[in-house]
Amino acid sequence: MSAEDDSALPAAATSDGLTAFGASLRAARLRRGLTLRELARRTHYSHSYMSKVENGIKHPSVELAQRCDKVLELDGELAESLTVRALTPAAVDAWPRPAQLPRGPVQFVGRTRELAELTAALLPDDRQAGVVPVVAVDGPPGVGKTALVVRWAHQNSHLFPDGVLFADLGGYGGDLQPPDAVLKVFLHELGIGGLPSGTGQPASLFRSFLHGRRLLIVLDNAADAQQVRALLPGAPGCAVVVTSRQRLSGLAVRDGAQRITLPPLGQADAVALLAEMIGRARVGSEPEAAAAIAGCCAGLPLALRLAGERLTNLPAKSLHAFAAELAAEEHALDMLTVLGDPRSAVRTVFSWSYLALAPADARVFQQLGLHPSAEFSTTVATAVTGLPPVEAERALERLAAAHLIEPVGPQRYRLHNPLRLYARERARA
């Protein structure tokens, strides 16, 4: 069979399992640029037999699958798919529909552009068929990355008929989850539990089971690209969205992920979120004070929600008085907290990013907090930190990648107000 004959392969098959294996084999072969005759020669099987396997007419042996894996450099995927089907045929045929999404936020404003970007990236048109769309949403702590992604997932889950998988990877403020542990949970949710030891690598099993399915996979709070890589499907049909405080540039470079950086809310949306929390009438009676509160919160939804919750518990307090207290910087972070839930406090949430910094970068962050202005140039940062210019620039780039400072122009950065107060607090501590 020549390479030109590949597009005309018949679709005949004796079962869904044989069809799926043959389709996987053919896709892998074509990716490697091999004709079926060449693959047959390298695996020492007849061309006729290989043709019947690829067309779903003949059942492949484990030995054949292993030889194809070696020639096609598939890391055991084809052999694993046969093993899984032999071990749990009922689970493959009676596919459960996982629905793991957590509850989305009740108050949600704005983000129209970012929701549209997620739709365009995760629901590709026909020109992008044949790829697994992956989107990495990054941004500063408290900016609402999880809220955005969960909102989009709830709105579009009906487009993924085989279900939605969700995992908090514990990259910041949680127990860091190794990929194998997440995969085992996913496989259990998909009805593949209790596999014997030695069955194979969870990543290979996961890819085999997802072949030909349409699932949405939401990976929240990732530490780095490496943690995510093993959780990506291998065949089209699924879509993956990841959130992280860190720019996952490696995921974009090596895995073709599209990056979306989520900025703080603009003033109008920030005031609208505050109004959702405390009531439109209260905000409408003191619009300037409401805008001042939004400014003190730097448009961070977490800070705005904490301010709104505090104001809800103080119905007699004027917004003007509250804004004045927030502007008195020594008490601002204490006001952005919730009694009985320290993990929701702005100070705690910021600490997860701060503690992930290298000691040298943490010192730079502290020193920037002591600078009187929220905006600064690389020249100013060099003077403030006392570092050589090249070292100072590299430190600023790393802090920007962690979204603890924001680039605002050529060699210029901004440290948002709540983060600046936290940096100053850490310096004084």
Image (cartoon, grey):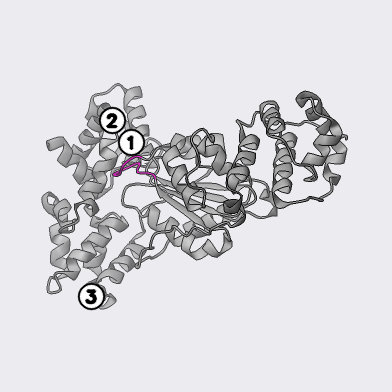
The dominant secondary structure in magenta is loop
Kind of residue indicated by mark 1: Leu
Res 159 quadrant in image: bottom right
Q: Is residue 343 left or right of residue 112?
A: left
Distance CA(mark 1)–CA(mark 2): 7 Å
Instruction: Decide: is 124 above or below 225.
Output: below
Percent of width and height locating residue 38: 81, 27
Q: Residue at x 68, y 34 (%)?
A: 62
Q: Residue at x 75, y 36 (%)?
A: 30
Which mark, residue 361?
A: 2
Percent of width and height locating residue 200: 54, 34
Check contact, mark 3 vs mark 1: CB within 8 A: no
Which mark, residue 282?
A: 3
Distance CA(mark 3)–CA(mark 1): 38 Å
Q: Is residue 297 left or right of residue 144?
A: left
Quick one: label 1 or label 2, which is nearer the N terminus? 2
SS at mark 2? Answer: helix
The span shown in magenta is 169-176
Check contact, mark 1 vs mark 2: CB within 8 A: yes
The crowd level at tag 2 (other Cα within 10 Å; few <14, some 14-19, many 20+) is some
Percent of width and height locating residue 424: 17, 40
Name the residue tied to disc 1.
399
Distance CA(mark 2)–CA(mark 3): 42 Å
Instruction: Examine the rendering and report whether any part of residue 229 can be seen.
Output: yes
Tell which of 275 and 89 is nearer to you.
Answer: 89
SS at mark 1? Answer: helix
